[in-house]
Image (spheres, rainbow, N blue to C red):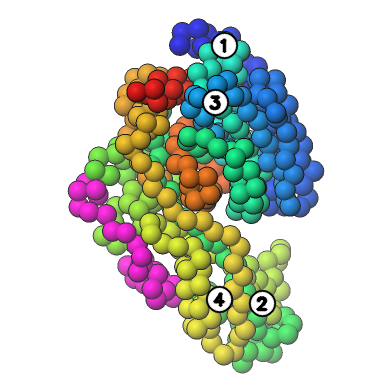
Amino acid sequence: MADLNAYILKNKDRFLEELMELLRIPSVSADPDFADDVFEAAEYVKERLIEAGADNVEVCPTDGFPIVYGEKIIDPKLPTVVVYGHYDVQPADPYELWDSPPFDPIVKDGKIYARGACDDKGQMYMHIKAFETLHKNNALPCNVKFMIEGEEEVGSPNLGPFIRENKERLAGDIILISDTSMIANDTPSITTGLRGLAYLEVEVVGPNRDLHSGVYGGAVANPINILAKMIASLTDENNHITIPGFYDDVVELSAEERANMARAPFELEHYKKHLDINDIHGEATYSTLERTSIRPTLDVNGMWGGYIGEGAKTVLPSKAKAKISMRLVPNQDDDKITQLFTEHFLRIAPPSVKVTVMPHHGGKPVVTPTDSIAYKAAENAYTKTFGKTPIPQRSGGSIPIVALFEEVLGLKSLLMGFGLDSDAIHSPNEHYGLFNFYRGIETITAFYGEYTELSKK
């Protein structure tokens, strides 16, 4: 282990510069204007995998953006770890809220600032460097396969067909993912659950054109007003979601399970200060940690219509739109929730407007085991590198393909995240700590040895 850490220390500046090069590529999968950049990022990942020592590396085409595959099979009798990550990133808008350009990464106060620094380029790249460290030192103890995609931020629409067509190629023993967070740099944790997701767009249409608000106001329905009222009705005074049947399949945790969750370190005043809010908000009778992990949610992610330019324009808009996401918990099904939402939203629409609901993408919630060889190996690895036993913790985020991996490949996933909730992923000024980047490489390196040894027993 000492020799491996010495290699990481010797090469840490190169590791960082390589990551910075990747971060300079604006691989925004949601915006067609960046399509060429997404393909460029795939090629960059391919080249770094080859340099690290992977075999059979290729950029695999899909109906959308490609998946980068590579492997190192040292002995078919040994365990095989399948590493998953993504090289695409969220849009950087609004650009004006960034303190530095989102695709011109800088290091400030021990953190890398750039879009994708934490989600997921920084965390994905740790795995390539951990593999390099092991391979270059003749210390790789098991087989490794890499599957790095470019559509995670748009729901991974082509990953399902890819893994179904490549089941034999992707055969392994565990899926290893770093796309989540831990509690704090001095309090390591392993993610043991993820919420599912149902994402939709709604449109409310009134008159056939924008109207003069003085001439028609009060006589013709205003789609923005109607949409606002419809959305407001989706939750009650206790912030409980009002869609009929929404909670039918929700798994309620026992008092003992909730008590165990409450043991995780959490300072409410620090939480409020960090977000610059006066108070917290959420479903009644549940704690903040519970609201962000074991309870479903409904949030408006964007809403627009009418005139939003400078100055005034007194129009009664023809249409209004909103993007809405619902985070789901075991055993909620995203298809069922999408159907329930659609039926309810159409039902509550007044006859003065026309309403359309357009599903985007979704994913199922998952809970990962804490009694597996892989979890124990990760626990040992964190304990070695952090000096503390990691705390199992459910995450509020979603990685829809985790359930897909289990369904198609029959493999459980291990979620070794090294980001922090304060890293501003999906927001302006996203960042990732240098400590987290390097400690992540060390911990992943240690995991391979622990996993291989435990698998022999």
Nearer to us: label 3 or label 1: 3
Picture coordinates of residue 374 (x, y %)? 40, 32
What range is drawn magenta here? Answer: 233-259
What is the secondary structure assignment of the residue under circle 2?
A: strand
Pointer 1: what residue?
A: 138
Pointer 3: what residue?
A: 76
Q: Residue at x 59, y 31 (%)?
A: 145
Could you tell me if the residues under marks 4 and 2 are in contact, i.e. CB atoms within 8 Å?
no
Nearer to us: label 2 or label 1: 1
Q: Amino acid at mark 3?
A: Pro
Magenta stretch encompasses residue 21: no
Q: CA distance from mark 3 to mark 4?
A: 58 Å
Q: Nearer the viewer, residue 99 or 296?
A: 296
**Residue density around tag 1, few if under 14, some if 14–19, many if 20 or more, within 10 Å:** few
Q: Nearer the viewer, residue 84 or 408?
A: 408
**Mark 3 or mark 2, earlier in chain:** 3
Q: Residue at x 39, y 43 (%)?
A: 368
Magenta stretch encompasses residue 239: yes
Picture coordinates of residue 83 (x, y %)? 55, 33
Which label belongs to residue 227?
4
**Mark 3 or mark 4, earlier in chain:** 3
